[in-house]
Image: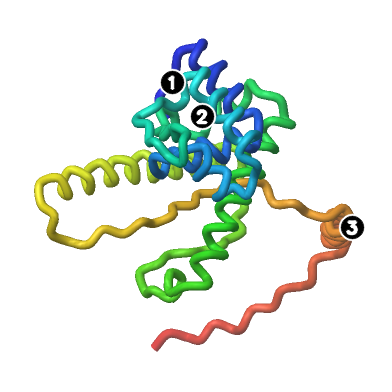
C-alpha cells in the first residue's frame, strides 16, 4: 500500500477504530451496498450501521453512488474509496488496543469466510490453496517475509484489475470470487512451555557431550 497524506491517514485510522465501521468498510470493498444490506450481513441494527456508514462517508472512506426508492423511503448505496487496512509504518503509530481490534476483525471475517466455504464445494476444489506452517525467523527474516507477503497482495490487486479489463473486452470466460488470506504473526507459547523449553536447554548445556565413535575407514581399492 502506498504512503498516504497525514490528514487521510488520520481519517483512515479513525474509520478503522470501530469494529462495525471496519466490517462495513470490508463489505463495501467487495461490492456496492446500502446500510440496510450491510446491517443484515453483519447482524447489527440498521440504526447503528447507518450511523457508522455516515461516519465513513464523512471521513472520506466511502462515497454515495446511487439512491433507490423503497417502501416510501430512499435507500442509499455506497462504494469504498479506501482499503480496510494499514501499512506496517501506520500500524506502529496506533495504540496496541486498536491494532488488536483491527487484527481481531480481520481474523473474524476470515474465519467466517472459511466456515462458509467449508459448507459448500469451495474447499473441495483441487485448485484451492491453504497452508499453516510454523517457522523460525529472526528480525531480518521477519522483515523479508513480510515484504514478500506485501508483494503478493500488490500483485493480487493488479490481477483483479487485469481480470476486470478482460471482462470488459469480452464477456466470455468464467470469473471466480476468491478470498485471499495472508497472515504472519508471532506464535503464542504458554508460560509453562517456555519454562520447560528453557529447562531442557539448560540440561543440554550442562550435560557432557556423548563421545562420538567413527566407523573404521575402509581401505580404498
- Where is residue 89? Give x, y as percent: 55, 24
Q: Secondary structure at mark 1?
A: loop
Query: Do residues under tags 1 and 2 come within 8 Å of each other at their CB atoms?
Result: yes
In depth, the one of 183 and 157 nearer the eye is 157
Q: Which one is in front in this view, the residue at disc 1 or the one at disc 3?
A: 1
Image-quadrant location for residue 102: top right
Q: Looking at the image, which residue is at 22% across and 48% down?
A: 163
Q: Looking at the image, which residue is at 39% across and 57% down?
A: 178
> Is 137 displayed left or right of 30 in the figure?
right
Which residue position holds label 2? 87
Which residue position holds label 3? 192
Q: Secondary structure at mark 2?
A: loop
Mark 1 or 3, nearer chain start: 1
Which residue position holds label 1? 3
- Where is residue 48? Give x, y as percent: 65, 34
In depth, the one of 17 and 190 nearer the eye is 17
Q: Where's the N terminus, which quadrant? A: top left
- Where is residue 95? Give x, y as percent: 71, 25
Amino acid at each position: 500500500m502506498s504512503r498516504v497524506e497525514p490528514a487521510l491517514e488520520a481519517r483512515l485510522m479513525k474509520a478503522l477504530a470501530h469494529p462495525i465501521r471496519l466490517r462495513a468498510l470490508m463489505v463495501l470493498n467487495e461490492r456496492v451496498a446500502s446500510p440496510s444490506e450491510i446491517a443484515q450481513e453483519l447482524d447489527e441494527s440498521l440504526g447503528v450501521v447507518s450511523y457508522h456508514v455516515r461516519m465513513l462517508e464523512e471521513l472520506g472512506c466511502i462515497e454515495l453512488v446511487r439512491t433507490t426508492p423503497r417502501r416510501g423511503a430512499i435507500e442509499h448505496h455506497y462504494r469504498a474509496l479506501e482499503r480496510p487496512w494499514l501499512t506496517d509504518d501506520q500500524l506502529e503509530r496506533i495504540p496496541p488496543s486498536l491494532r488488536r481490534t483491527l487484527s481481531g476483525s480481520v481474523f473474524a471475517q476470515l474465519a467466517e469466510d472459511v466456515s462458509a466455504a467449508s459448507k459448500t464445494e469451495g474447499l473441495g476444489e483441487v485448485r484451492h490453496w491453504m497452508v499453516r506452517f510454523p517457522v523460525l525467523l529472526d528480525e531480518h527474516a521477519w522483515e523479508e517475509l513480510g515484504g514478500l507477503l506485501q508483494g503478493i497482495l500488490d500483485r493480487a490487486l493488479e490481477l483483479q484489475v487485469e481480470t476486470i479489463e478482460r471482462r470488459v473486452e469480452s464477456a466470455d470466460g468464467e470469473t471466480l470470487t476468491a478470498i485471499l488470506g495472508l497472515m504472519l504473526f508471532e506464535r503464542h507459547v504458554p508460560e509453562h512451555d517456555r519454562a520447560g523449553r528453557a529447562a531442557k536447554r539448560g540440561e543440554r548445556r550442562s550435560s557432557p557431550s556423548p563421545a562420538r565413535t567413527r566407523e573404521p575407514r575402509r581401505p580404498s581399492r
